[in-house]
Amino acid sequence: MNPNGCKYGQIKLDFASLHTPRLITNAGIFTNKYQEIDVFRTRTLGRKLFGPSFDYILFLRPRQWPILTFQLMVGILTAPSVVAAISQGSFESFSWNSLVMAWIAWVVCLNGGTLAFNSAYDRDENDIAYLVKPPPPPQHLATFSFILMTIGAVLALLVTPAFGLVTGGCVIMSILYSHNAFRWKSIPGGDLAINMIGYGGCTTLSGIMVGQVVLGAISVNPDQAGWLIIVGFGLLFGSFYPLTQIYQLDTDRKCGDLTLVAAIGTGKALTLAIVLGVAATIFLLGAAWLWNDAFRLLLPLLAALIIWIVMLVVWYRKSARMKVAAHENGMYIALTVWALIDLSVLISRYGSML
């Protein structure tokens, strides 16, 4: 039991069924035998290869890395120097070393470390984002993840000082969000603000800065459209963040974490998500408008953003009848729509070149 009184899940196998053994926890039952087999095969293999240290890797939540990598790439591919290089077909000054170092710093060290650092203090027993049925956190997970985030900040500093400052600022926000001495996660609105700034805004800002650096640009500052994209994705993550908390609502309340969703409830949280989604639409379309003279190139992005808003409205209307598993599945559906928005942003940026 953790200091907040949240017990770890009791895990056992139930062979009462003649057909398929079911994995039972005090969080529920795997109804999909393939999901059960996949989870435990992966963890069994990982522990055979790496021993108990595999759990440290597990809490870095590698399933999330492709998602953040894609968002970082959106920033990189919308950087003015990258756009110019692609339009001219000129990549003589391209630095693969800086690109790889930036990816390791942001996605693996900072992002993976942030998620692991949060798990070290949350000690969840139920599903968390990108990690089904988490095991008990390893003893030194907090120290390990803090060191990893610090390494990320140093690597980012080596890429360019501005990127290092942004990464260092996000390390501080990670500590403020999760550590028991601050626990901004339990301050309604504080949790939302940190995620909007860190995941939404700073990931895109970092991508733009890295894009400038890898092509040897003197300035890493975003242009006007770049700032609109940064704010737009910050708002879009604000629209997404409540979706990551709704299915964990009972757990957060049990553990005494007064997150924004726990404070205002599911209905109001989804209303806020819709409002922030509309605001994000305005900024993202504003950036696309600066990039294009033809309205038709804005249409894919407009359509993707409308899908996002409609998804949230439907979710709001059905939320009172939805079970926890449905809310969790909804979050992963939202990630798919987010990917569609990312792709549409790139279409609006490069559509005129096609």
Image: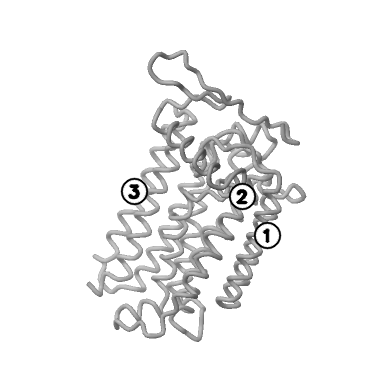
| Residue at the limit of the structure toward the front, as seen here | 48
Q: Are marks 3 and 1 in contact (CB under 8 Å)?
A: no
The local secondary structure at tag 3 comes to helix
Above or below, 161 against 100 in this view is below
Amino acid bearing label 3: Ile
Q: Are marks 3 and 2 in contact (CB under 8 Å)?
A: no
Specify whether residue 244 is in view: no
Mark seen at residue 147:
1
Image coords of residue 238 (percent x, y): 52, 52
Q: Are marks 1 and 2 in contact (CB under 8 Å)?
A: no
Q: Quadrant of residue 295?
A: bottom left
Answer with mark 3 or mark 2, whichever residue precedes in sequence.
Answer: 2
Q: Nearer the viewer, mark 3 or mark 1?
A: 1
Local packing at callout 3 (Cα closer than 10 Å; few below 14, some 14-19, many 20+) is some
Left/right of residue 46 with respect to residue 82 in the rendered view:
right
Image coords of residue 351 (percent x, y): 26, 69
The local secondary structure at tag 1 comes to helix
Mark seen at residue 307:
3
Answer with mark 1 or mark 2, whichever residue precedes in sequence.
Answer: 2
User: Which quadrant is the N terminus positioned in?
Assistant: top right
Above or below, 258 against 230 in this view is above
The local secondary structure at tag 2 comes to helix
Left/right of residue 353 with respect to residue 117 in the rendered view:
left
| Residue at the limit of the structure toward the left, as seen here | 354
Q: Which residue is mark 2?
A: 116
Local packing at callout 2 (Cα closer than 10 Å; few below 14, some 14-19, many 20+) is many
**Mark 1–mark 2 distance (CA, rounded to whole Å):** 11 Å
